[in-house]
Image (tube, helix red, strand yellow):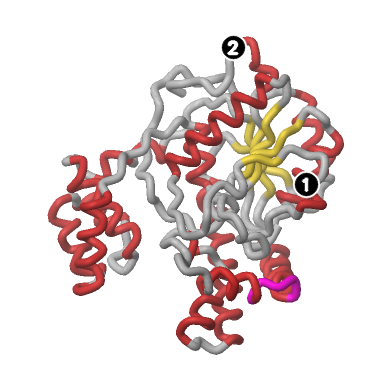
Amino acid sequence: MSESLLQQSDRALRPLALVGPTASGKTSLALELARLRSDAEIVSVDSMAVYRRMDIGTAKPSRAERSGLQVHMIDLVEPYEDFTVREYQRGARRVIAGIAERGHRALLVGGTGLYLRSLTDDLQMPGRWPSVASRLEEEADVHGPEMLHARLGALDPVAARRIEPANRRRVVRALEVTIGSGLPFSSFGPGLEAYPPTEIVQVGIRYEPSVHDERVRVRFGELLEEGLLREVRSLSSEPRGLSRTARQAIGYRELLAHIETGVPYDEAVSTAVQRTLALARRQWSWFKRDPRIEWLEPGDDVLGRLLERWDARGGNETSTDGGTTAADGAEFTGERLVR
């Protein structure tokens, strides 16, 4: 990493990351570990938990669950604000450094892979060009993302091959960076294919489709019983609404369609469940490529094995290589809907 998260003397405090697909039980495990180890402070790695009042659908730990514990990187911004990978990276690095200064150890928990990679690999994020993005959004409103994708193909064929023509958010972001920086969007991304040594110890809960799929379905029903529709309705009634980023959160997006455009309730719920199942598969595909992650089997004593890793203080050596790069704005739409 080009800039170490910790001082050399603090190597015993190297963060431990608990990762895995949605519905793998990461949050519950993290809370249990933090109650058993007083030196643990939880750092959320969730692209939607940063939003205040988006509590039920993001499955944030409740106030009661967090009682007596330190949980960071949640409730950072209002739902009408956009939030970027770069902002997460800056904030999380400050939090982790502060935890180490207190003699404690960061327990990173979540499934937003790009957020985690921004920390494990010190990804260098391209900037923002709001005026360019605004103009592109206007063009997308008139002509659709497919026209912009064709334009991207002429400017950056590599990026165009990596992005689906209908994926408006990524097409617009790729063109924003390409036009704004004068460099191809794809030039910011090769680092995601490399897995250099990292000072963050990584442990994952393996994806088991038969188990996870059922947990997703059951948990979404529980979220609805807890008042998810009421939460989404309250957010939709606020004058400033929800930002482009916040509106993509699974569960919120579908229920907003029900509230705002009349999509039948049952259809909205079914779509949300299917999107969550697809998210779990994407998360597993992302994480399983990383050879630095040690995988735990769901049927084992996962908490016991996690505690062993915590007490061992083991892990990879810190990389001395330069930071890798990634395109801020890559696909991520809420790291989990269920814990």
231 left or right of 81 in image: right
Residue 136 shown left or right of residue 114 in the figure? left
Observer-nearest of 207 and 318: 318
User: Which quarter of the picture shows residue 318?
Assistant: top right
Q: Distance between the residues labelled 2 and 1?
A: 31 Å
- Where is the C terminus found, in terms of image quarters? bottom right
105 or 70, nearer to the observer: 70
Q: Position of residue 320 (x, y in %)?
A: 46, 17
Tell me, yes or no, whether the highlighted magenta stretch contains residue 228: yes
Q: Where is residue 313 in the image (x, y as percent from the top left)?
A: 73, 23
Residue neighbourhood size for the residue with mark 2, other residues' Cα within 10 Å, grouped as few (<14), some (14–19), many (≥20): few
The one nearer the camera, 296 or 60, is 60
What is the three-letter code of the residue carrying label 1? Arg
Q: What stretch is highlighted in magenta?
A: 225-229
Furthest-front residue in view? 239
Q: In this view, does 151 lie above or below 177?
A: below
Q: Does the image show residue 161? A: yes
What residue sits 46% from the left and 23% below the top?
1
Q: Which of 47 and 16 is in front in this view?
A: 47
Give the secondary structure at mark 1: helix
Q: Mark 1 points at which residue?
A: 66
In the image, residue 299 lies at what x, y percent?
80, 53
Q: Residue at x 22, y 60 (%)?
A: 136
Q: Is mark 2 on a helix, strand or loop?
A: helix
Query: Measuring 77% from the left and 50% from the top, which residue is drawn there?
Result: 28
Residue 267 is covered by the magenta coloring: no
The circle drawn on residue 8 is: 2
Residue at figure coordinates x 52%, y 32% from the top left: 120
